[in-house]
Structure formats: C-alpha cells, structure tokens
Image: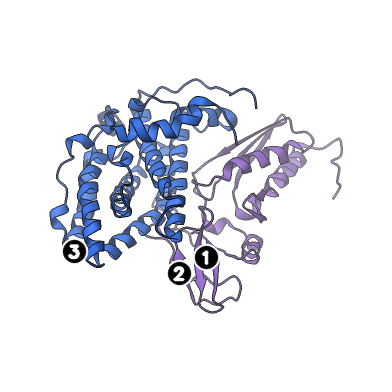
Amino acid sequence: MTAVTEVAAPDLTTPRAQLLLVLADDELITGHRASHWTGVAPSLEEDMAFSSIAQDEINHADLWYQVLIGFDVTGEPQRAAVDALGLGRAPQEYRHAIACERPPRDFAFTLARHWAYDRFDAVRLGALTQSSDPDIASVAGKLQFEERYHLEHADQWFSRLVNGGEEAIGRFRDGLTVALPEALGLAEPFEDEDEALASGLLPVSHPDLGGRWLEIVAPLLRTADMDDLVPSAVPAEASGGRLGRHTDDFTADVWPEMTSLYREHRGARW
Amino acid sequence: MNDVLPPEQTATTLLDAVRGAVADVPDPELPPVTLGMLGMVHAVDVEDGHVRIELLPTFAGCPATEIMERDVVEAVGRVPGVDQVSVRFRFDPPWTPDRIDAIGRERLREFGIAPPGGATGAPTADGRVTLPLMLGPASDPRPCPYCGSSDTVRESNFGPTPCRDVRFCEGCQQPFEAFKA
C-alpha cells in the first residue's frame, strides 16, 4: 500500500462527535497507561491482565471512533480515518478526563485508579445502552459485556487489598486518596452536553453519572472503613479534561509517545 | 456437486457459492473453526457482482477482525462472477455464544478450549436480543475439554486472546482455556 486512502475529515464539533470523542479518548488513554505494565507487572497474571486490558481499551476506543466516522466507511478508508482521530489530533483536541492520563505511579495507585475508572465506565455504559442513537446503544451493550471482566478484576483487587495486611491497606489507601477525587473529573460535562442530553444521544448527564458512581463507590468505601475517602470535589489541577485542558502527563508524556510513529510515518503498516 | 459452476449459473447459485466461501473462512486465531461455525455471518448480499457481507464480531476488542476482513475479501474474490467485495462489522444484533454450532463447539473442545454453554440473556420487552450474564463473567464450572470433569475453576479473567479466559481442572490437574461468555 503506497498511498493512504482518505475520507473527508468528520465534523468534530457536533454534540454526537463530542460525546464519542469523550468515550473513545477515555478508553484510548486508559489503555495506553495500562500498557505500562506489559513486561514489568508484579506477577505474570497481572502482566497478562493489564496487557489484555490495554488491548481491550484501545480496541474499544477504535470502535467508538468507527461509530463517530460511521459504519458505512469500511476497509482502508476506515482505518485511515480511525488513525487520524486516535493519533492525528493535537493534544488540546483530546477530551479524556485528566484522571486517565496520570502516570501509573505504583501498582497500588494503578489498582486504585483501575477500580475508580471501571466502576465509572460500568455506570456510563449501562446508561448508554438506552441512547437514542442505535449504533451507540448497540456498541455500549457489546462493551458492557466485555468490560465485566475488567470490573470483576478491579473489584477482586479492591476486596483483597482492603482486607489485606497493614502495608496493603496503607498503600491502597494512598492510591485511592489521589485517584478518587481525580476520578470525579470523569463526571465533568463536555461542551455541548446539554444538546446531547436533549436529543437522547446521552441518556444521563456526566454529572448525574458521577452521582450514580458515588452511590456505588461510597458504600463500598464505608465497608472498608474508608468513609473519609468518599470524594466531593475534583482538584483544580485534575479538572478540565473534557474541555481539552491537559497536564504535562499527557502533553509531554502520553501524547508524544503515542503519536510518534503516526507523526513520522503516517500510514505505516506492520 | 460440480467444481466449476456452469456458465448459465443463476443469481441463486452465485449467492450460495459466496455464502459457502464466507462460511468456510477459518478464524485466524482458532483455525479449526470457521466464521460459519462461530455464527459470525449475519448477512450476505450480491448485486451485479458486488458482494456485501455483514459480520458479527465475537469480541469488539478483537485484533483479528482486520485479518478476518482481509481473508473474507480474498476468499469471496476468488468466487467466479464476483467483481467487488465489501465487508462491514455490525453490533446489532450482538453476537451471542448460542450462535456457535455443534461442529464449532466440538472443534473448540478438540483444540483444548472449553466452548461456552450457549446461554443467552433474556430478550428485552421489545424483543431485542441481549448479551448474557450482564452482572459478572460466567463463573460456572466449564467442563474440562481434556477429561470432561466439571470440577474446574476459573483462574484468570485474561487469557491469550480477548475472547478466552484461563481455567484449571482439578480432575486431571491441567490448565485449559475457555471461550468467554
């Protein structure tokens, strides 16, 4: 293949495109951060787990980009358009929450964010199965089915660590202390969210999804004697991802690495 | 059955030949089973030599779908009378484990992969098909593909491909893989 087949670049300003970028970008960046553990996780099982999660999330992002472009675009033009969305945008054009771009820090923080994120993702996918857009609704149902495996993995670690020894509890607590308030940034609305709500594309607003998320995570934290960790506000430095504001963790770390091949050799194939 | 289609072939025989070619494409990651056995072929349509195929992916996060698409285009392109092939994936209706046919289940077992039980979620009020077991991954003891024992446990949610998990058989003390459902 010598030339990249092009289709007209999609309009990214519509409420539908804005919603799909939020969904896709959260998954894409979560997947990239999960891939950090490939080859260096604390156990072989966790290496498999986070490598699989990375692969799943990046493919889920790919699928949301396909929905944005339209399933009528297939084959090479579809691949080129998906790559352009996933890898061809400037950092400020990405709409993921800042929680997703944070570095893995240690394995305890990784598990804390994994739990916070997958608990939110489950709530959001459940709501999206009622979307007025049939492609969004059917893909949400499909992903909900696949994400069960991630959620169960995250929940198993939550139980294991909060019921563990002093070091396990202490380190997981430190991870949750940072991850939970930042995860509230997942519940920030995107620019034209009101229009997406009015048309039923997004059946439940991001702030309301955040409320539903808290209804699930707060009781779990209470049973773990961690009531004091129930988050109430996003720290200022972790706010604004939905509007394209990102930290150096993205603009100077994930983004340059993730897009380097695309920027150097657009259309490269394995 | 003739190897070569007669020159006076009708639209129906061309459609049958195309259907057969799609159904016989092997899964790139599980070559003993075909797309037909897995129940992934949703629709095949032929119009003036242009074939349109709709496939249902078993897993959205499956990196093999690109290879399947290429293999389907190649296989169907070899059918006499076909000029152009388009493949698209769709998610409605969702692929469900009950779509795997009896031969597919047996081939999976022979390959050391326990097939899913065939469970499908209850249809919704409007009759839509739903995916099974929304609340958690299937933890049912899957019979061991080697010795048939049901004394098995799920050891890991994550296996060598997105569609498989890892189990252990207490009966024959062997690890094995299971198709996620």
Q: Amino acid at mark 2?
A: Asp
Residue where numbered disc 1 is placed: B117
Chain represented in purple? B
Query: Which of the two discs, 3 and 1, sits closer to the camera?
Result: 3
Whole-number angstrom distance, CA of label 3 to CA of label 2:
28 Å
Asked if residue A196 lies left or right of residue B148, the reply is: left
User: What is the quadrant of residue A148 in the picture?
Assistant: bottom left
Which residue is situated farthest in the bottom direction here? Answer: B171
Residue toward you, A197 or A217? A217
Position of residue A19 relative to residue B135, above or below, is: above
Q: At 54% across and 59% down in the image, what residue appears?
A: B98
Residue A233 point in image, percent of width and height: 15, 42
Position of residue B48 relative to residue B154, above or below, is: above
Q: At 31% across and 36% down in the image, what residue appears?
A: A249
Q: At 45% across and 26% down in the image, what residue appears?
A: A88
Residue where numbered disc 2 is placed: B140
Q: Amino acid at mark 3?
A: Thr
Counting residues from the start of the chain, the first of labels 2 and 1 encountered is: 1
Q: Pick the quarter of the image with the N terminus of chain A.
A: top right
Q: At 25% across and 57% down in the image, what residue appears?
A: A172
Residue A115 point in image, percent of width and height: 30, 53
Do circles 3 and 2 both sit on a common chain? no
User: What is the quadrant of residue B71 in the picture?
Assistant: top right
Position of residue B143 relative to residue A59, above or below, is: below
